Amino acid sequence: MGVRERYQMRVAIVTQFPTDPNVPHGGVEAVSVHLARSLAQHRDLEIDVVTLDPRASSIGIELWEGVRIHRLPRAGNAGELWNAIGPGRRQIAGYLGQLQPDVIHAHDTYGLMVKGLPFLRVFTIHGFIYGDTLVSGLKWPWLRSRIWRYFETAGWADQPNIISISPYVRERLSGVARGAIHDIDNPIGESFFHLPRRIRKGVIFSAAAICPRKNTLRLVEAVSRLAQQGRPVELRLAGSVISPGYGEQVRQFIRAHQLEDKVVFLGQIGTDRIMEELVAASVFALVSLEENSPMGIEEAMAASVPVVTSNRCGMPYMVRHGETGYLVNPDNIVDIARRLDQILSNDELALAMGEKSHAIALDRFHPRRVADRTREVYLDIARRDV
């Protein structure tokens, strides 16, 4: 299927997309917003976003910053996996058949919905749901994980072009993916690169849902250790509690160790508030058990904030140990506390780490640079198809 004889290439970005593009929820929605906006600045690209919206009662099309957003009402109340391989897939396939884009760029579970469609296709993998499920705290995690793994790996094997957001993703695709793999980081909002620094001494900021996978309790325990040592410290947690039982565990620990004035729950906050928190933060911390390429780390680096994060999964490919922050064992409270303290107690080190982080983020995560690299993938697969 050759690209149409015209100047513009029509790209359908098939993905989760927020009702209000200025208030994305979760990493995939944020990436989709930044990528669509930046791609639309290329005059040779015509960008359509196709998304299933549970709040839509009929198909709606709206124009946003040069991007056409197509909101399809999500049919029924099927779970995420069943919707991706069943009713959602039929909806998306039918609509794309009418839209007839030159290239489809699917994200996350939407990759399962476009599996096998006769278009030029690109797929960005944002996470390994089967891996996340093992540390989700849900019932029957091994069974759930095996089911997800079956469908996820089948979907990856079908994709002719995959965008890997981290070397960790590329490693996990070894022996599974049959198509070309392109290495491109996720984009973040341009505003994060222009934030001033008005640091409040001792402030640790973390942007992550409160759940077992994000390992919130271990971070709180590390802060408790610092407080017991007499260190001036305040942990500010931005994120909703998605595992109520685990959230109560965290709160019980805080009460038992009298940390009410040391740990602040901010709840789910918007982008503007996140930027305000980063402006004041001495350090950003994320000690998750499973991650690919967390947006929170990218945003902290762009804002010149040093990072303490886990030494596993995709995180070691983001943070340079001793240069832009520290990598820690997420199960070792002593290790987490020690590395936090090293940054909090050394202003010169923190400044140097922040400056190095910003320079790396500018090259890897700036939305215009990510869009340029993504556009080159579209043009490359179109040339190969002619």
Image (cartoon, rainbow, N blue to C red):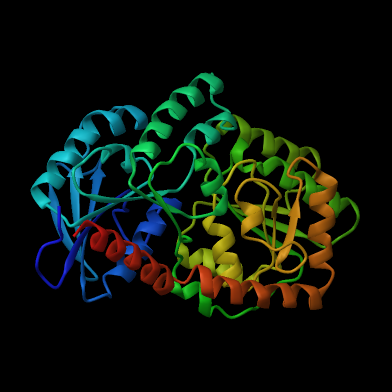
Q: How many marks?
A: 0
- Quadrant that contains the C terminus: bottom left
Q: For this rendering, which residue is in front, 343 or 253?
A: 343
Q: Is residue 139 visible?
A: no
Residue 167: x and y in percent read 56, 53
Q: Please tell me in which quadrant of the rendered image residue 297 appears.
A: bottom right
Q: For this rendering, which residue is in front, 31 or 253?
A: 31
| Foreground pick, 113 / 199 | 113
Q: Residue 102, relative to residue 151: is it above or below? A: below
Figure quadrant of residue 279:
bottom right
Q: Residue furthest right?
A: 229
How far from the left and from the top, in percent, is residue 79?
34, 28
Q: Residue 119 location, x and y as percent?
A: 20, 48
Please tell me which residue is depicted at 49% across the width and 57% down the height of the picture. Answer: 269
Relative horizontal placement of residue 166, taking residue 96 as reference (left or right): right
Residue at (81, 44) in percent of width and height: 333
Residue 56 visible at all: yes
| Position of 84 relative to 51 (above/below) | above
Residue 55, given in percent of the width and then of the height, sits at 24, 43
